[in-house]
Image (cartoon, grey):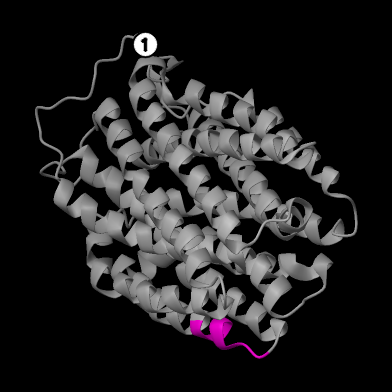
Amino acid sequence: MRISSLTGSRIAVAAAFFAQGFVFISLTTRLPRFLEQWGLDEVALSLLLLMMVLLAGVGSLVAERAAHRVGSAPMLRLGLALMVVAVPAITLAPAVGFFVGGVALYGIALGLVDATSNMQAVDLEHRYGRPILPSSHGYWTTGGILAAAIALATGHLSPEVGAFVAVVPLAIAFARFVPRVAPGADGVPGVDVAPPHQAAPSDAVPVPWKPIWLVGAGLVVFYMVDTTAATWGPVYLARSFDAPGNLVALATFPYLVTSIVVRLAGGALVTSFGVTPLLRIGAVVASGALALVALAPTWQVAVAGFTVLGAAVALVAPLSFSAAGRIAAGPTADDGAAAEPDRARTDAVIARFNQFNYVGALLGAVLTGFVGADNMRLGFALPAVLVLALVPLAPAFARGALNRR
């Protein structure tokens, strides 16, 4: 396999994660303005987010069914293309019905992109033979940071400015996603993006679902925390502290900055300290950070809590997908090397594993909204307790960990 092939594949995967993060944070940082524009309260927003998360689950299931027939790359392009339509529908909606329809379409696109981008990254990590998922998720955070920075800079402009964020997935939707590059019969690298004739996932070796469920529980906890911060953070600053409207994105911006620092260093951190200690320490620190947010006397103190929180939970999601991919690939060879995975089987497991994402998102986006409907501080107190579940779950993430540099 040529190094250039792997490098090109890694760039394509990074671009997909970047586009996803850019669009998601562009929309969540504008939630307070959408609430004001359409006259929605916290309960109405919770129901809207519930619809979006459920449709994202549908999108992930579609990705699972389609990936082994047409490949995950075409499904990833489809998801990005749907975002190009959904973003203007949300930001330029002439009536609330169009706004709701745009959110629904975005939910389906979100599920497609979530599942297929992680499928591609897991396969790429196996080919590199070292941790790749932390840096891949780091590019999601990079996109989010840029989006938050733009939101801060353009907070005084009309909401219609947000329609321009659709340009990013439009450009990346037609990029060539080819992380599955293998030598052809003549020794020249060829392209394999799970072609239509690929066989369905093999059942010769049963998937060990018990350890996957343990890691999935950890992913639920992460997305509960992450969605609470990203979705409700700006609303919290705006409604509980009456922070200036052009500064509510500060609930998200520093959270993402500290997150990307940790994610880009994730491979080295895992190699140096191990998966389990990193996750356990992160869980305890995250609990304290969320308590600081919930008890903050000013919006500046709440922002400090979000900043610490970003670093504390940054590695949970990438390490969970990495662990699920290793478990799905099956046992290692006698020499300790990972066996060549059944790609269709691994894709199917990753798509199903991605459903844990939406369980966590439901808890973070919907439950937080209902619990904090009268007092948003209570909405942040709940995840401060639940995030400690990562302490006993951490060893499940270390199964067959890739610790090589």
Residue 57 image point, x, y percent: 41, 39
Q: Residue at x 55, y 80 (%)?
A: 377
152 is within the stretch colored magenta: no
Q: In this view, does 368 lie above or below 358?
A: below
Left or right, 355 with reference to 100: left
Work out whether residue 295 can be spotted: yes
Look at 36% across and 73% down and name the residue there: 386
Give how far across and how far down residue 34 sits, in percent: 73, 53
User: Which secondary structure lies at badge 1?
Assistant: loop
Q: In which quarter of the image is the C terminus?
A: bottom left
Which segment is the magenta one?
A: 291-297
* Extreme-bottom residue of the structure: 297
Quadrant location of the N terminus in the rendered image: top left
Q: Position of residue 360 (x, y in %)?
A: 40, 57
Residue 215 pos. (x, y %):
27, 56
Visible in this render: residue 405? no
Task: Say what amino acid the circle numbered 1 marks.
Answer: Pro
User: Would you call the spot at circle 1 few (<14 residues within 10 Å), some (14-19), or many (20 or more)?
Assistant: few
User: Going 40% across and 50% down the picture, which residue do you hit?
Assistant: 357
Q: In the visual, does 367 lie left or right of 310? A: left
Task: Decide whether the magenta segment is chiefly helix, strand or loop.
Answer: helix
The residue positioned farthest toward the right in the image shown: 157
Work out whether residue 101 or residue 199 is closer to the camera in this orientation and state it. Answer: 101
- Residue 118 found in image quarter: top left
Q: Is residue 338 left or right of residue 351?
A: left
**Front in this rendered view, residue 395 or 79:** 79
- Choose top left, top right, bottom left or bottom right for residue 183: top left
Residue that label 1 marks? 196
When the figure is inspected, residue 99 is found, relative to residue 404, above or below; the finding is above
Q: How many labels does the image show?
A: 1
Q: Does the magenta stretch include residue 296?
A: yes
Q: State the residue at coordinates (37%, 56%).
A: 319
